[in-house]
Amino acid sequence: STNYNWRISRYPIKNPEDIEKLIWLFENTTWLFLKENFENASRIFRNKGEPQFFLPRSGYQTLFIDWMGLENLIYGLADFSEKIEQLIKVINKSYDNLYGNIISYGKVKIINFGENIDANVAPPQYFEKYCIPFYEERANQLKKAGIYTHIHIDGSFKPLLKYLKGLPFDGLEALTPLPQGDVTLEEIKEAIGEKILLDGIPAILFLSNNSLEKLQEFVERLVKIFYPKLILGVSDEL
């Protein structure tokens, strides 16, 4: 861990010429699964828990978070959408070897799609067009190999509620309810159906201006609504 923060102040991809370079990069990138790291974690956890990890993000989220930022990505989708869409497909395909490695290894049981979804940056029209097809392809690929999956959705997501029940994941992680998020516990429960909720406790309830009694009351209500489809934790990071 570190005791400082950082942020990207300038993104490298801004125009069609930059996109061509990034297409070349991902066409010539091979992702590997390091089974040694997984086995080290297994030895540490032993019978205390199941080692898990998150995978590289979908093409859309990768471009927004790592390469373009939101403004450049949205303008790019408006001005040269064909190039952006080609790049998204190339990024998604670059993971073929990684998924093959994981499946052939045969010991991974749970995987997280660490997407950091927020409806403000992945609104319904883009979430439906660019994210869901990727999830359906990759989560179903893992499911056929007997691997459980869950996705990290940690921002505002009320506009995406209608999609949650149909997503191809076994669980939904870090869905953040009021008073930190933008939905109630009841809205989450109705939207996810029989899927497992991972976490569920708003991080701000741990701040000093909230009482222990308020935290306990919220947790008891959370458990009552979602049990037994619940792995209790903090939404999002404390």
Image: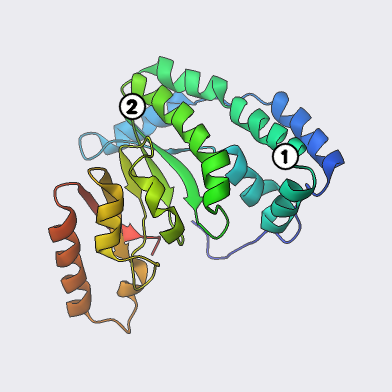
Q: Is residue 171 toward the left or the right of residue 222 in the image? A: right
- For the question of whether residue 57 can be seen, the reply is no
Q: Above or below — where is 195 with respect to 236?
A: above
- Tell me which residue sits at (74%, 41%) in the image: 81
> Which of 1 and 189 lies nearest the eye of the viewer?
189
> Which of 169 and 128 lies nearest the eye of the viewer?
128
Q: Earlier in the sequence, mark 1 or mark 2?
A: 1
**Residue 160 appears at what percent x and percent y?**
44, 53
Amino acid identity at mark 1: Ile
The residue where tag 2 is placed is 147
Secondary structure under tag 2 reads: loop
Q: Is residue 117 toward the left or the right of residue 164 in the image? A: right
- Tell me which residue sits at (41%, 30%) in the image: 139
Q: Is residue 229 toward the left or the right of residue 142 in the image? A: left
- For the question of whether residue 196 can be seen, the reply is yes
Q: In the rendered image, which quarter contains the C terminus? A: bottom left
Residue 22 falls in image quadrant = top right
**Residue 116 appears at what percent x and percent y?**
49, 51
> Which of 146 and 211 lies nearest the eye of the viewer?
146
- Tell me which residue sits at (35%, 18%) in the image: 106
The residue where tag 1 is placed is 84
Q: How many residues crowd mark 1 within 10 Å: few (<14), some (14–19), many (20+)? A: many
**Residue 164 appears at what percent x and percent y?**
37, 46
**Residue 201 appears at what percent x and percent y?**
29, 63
